[in-house]
């Protein structure tokens, strides 16, 4: 459902579909916050792309429940607060995009992955740090 001029909040029911593997809502005009228990039912989710919207609030610390997550792109939104340290426990994570938000802090990755691309909140040139 990317680039479809969608507006309003993301229906919370989306985050309760346990068979979902992909959520792509990038490039719309979605607003509101992401549910605190976003990953509670998404044990199979591999990719979440919510970039290029008007989402706000904090990134839920429950993202650690998305244990199969390979891509998390929350860039170009209005997220605030600290980056949840729990993101560092995602063993399958390969790509993390958080730039163009108002986030603070760093992530300590509890695993060494040579293929992990991490773009911090203030990175403008999209160059991986690791």
Image (cartoon, rainbow, N blue to C red):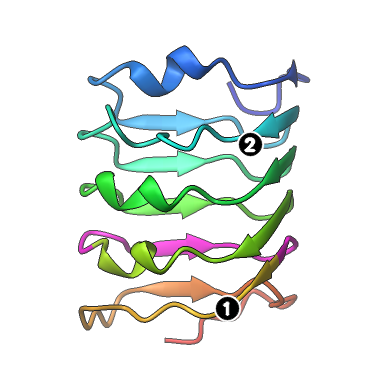
Q: Which is nearer the eye, 36 or 30?
A: 36
Rendering quarter of residue 89: bottom left
* Residue 107 shown in magenta: no
Magenta residues span 91-102
Q: Earlier in the sequence, mark 2 or mark 1?
A: 2
Q: Tell me the residue at 33%/70% (across/down).
A: 88
Question: Left of 91 or right of it: where is 97?
Answer: right
Query: Which quarter shows the C terminus?
Result: bottom left
- Residue 110: percent from left, percent from top: 23, 78
Rendering quarter of residue 127: bottom right
* Residue 98 shown in magenta: yes
Query: Which quarter shows the N terminus?
Result: top right
Q: Which residue is mark 1?
A: 105
Decide whether the magenta segment is chiefly helix, strand or loop.
loop
Q: Tell me the residue at 21%/49% (across/down).
A: 67
Question: What label sits on residue 26 in the rendered view?
Answer: 2
Rendering quarter of residue 82: bottom right
Q: Residues within 10 Å of mark 1 (few under 14, many from 20)?
A: few
Question: Left of 116 or right of it: where is 2?
Answer: right
The residues bearing labels 2 and 1 have C-alpha atoms spaced at a distance of 24 Å
- Residue 45: percent from left, percent from top: 29, 36
């Amino acid at each position: 459902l990317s680039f479809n001029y969608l507006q309003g909040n993301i229906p919370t029911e989306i985050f309760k579909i346990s068979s979902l593997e992909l959520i792509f809502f990038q490039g719309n005009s979605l607003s509101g916050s992401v549910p605190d228990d976003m990953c509670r039912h998404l044990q199979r989710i591999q990719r979440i792309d919510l970039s290029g919207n008007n989402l706000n609030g904090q990134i839920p610390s429950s993202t650690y429940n998305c244990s199969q997550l390979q891509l998390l792109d929350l860039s170009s939104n209005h997220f605030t607060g600290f980056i949840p340290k729990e993101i560092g426990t995602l063993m399958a994570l390969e790509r993390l995009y958080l730039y163009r938000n108002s986030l603070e802090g760093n992530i300590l990755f509890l695993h060494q992955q040579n293929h992990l691309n991490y773009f911090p909140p203030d990175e403008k040139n999209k160059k991986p740090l690791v």
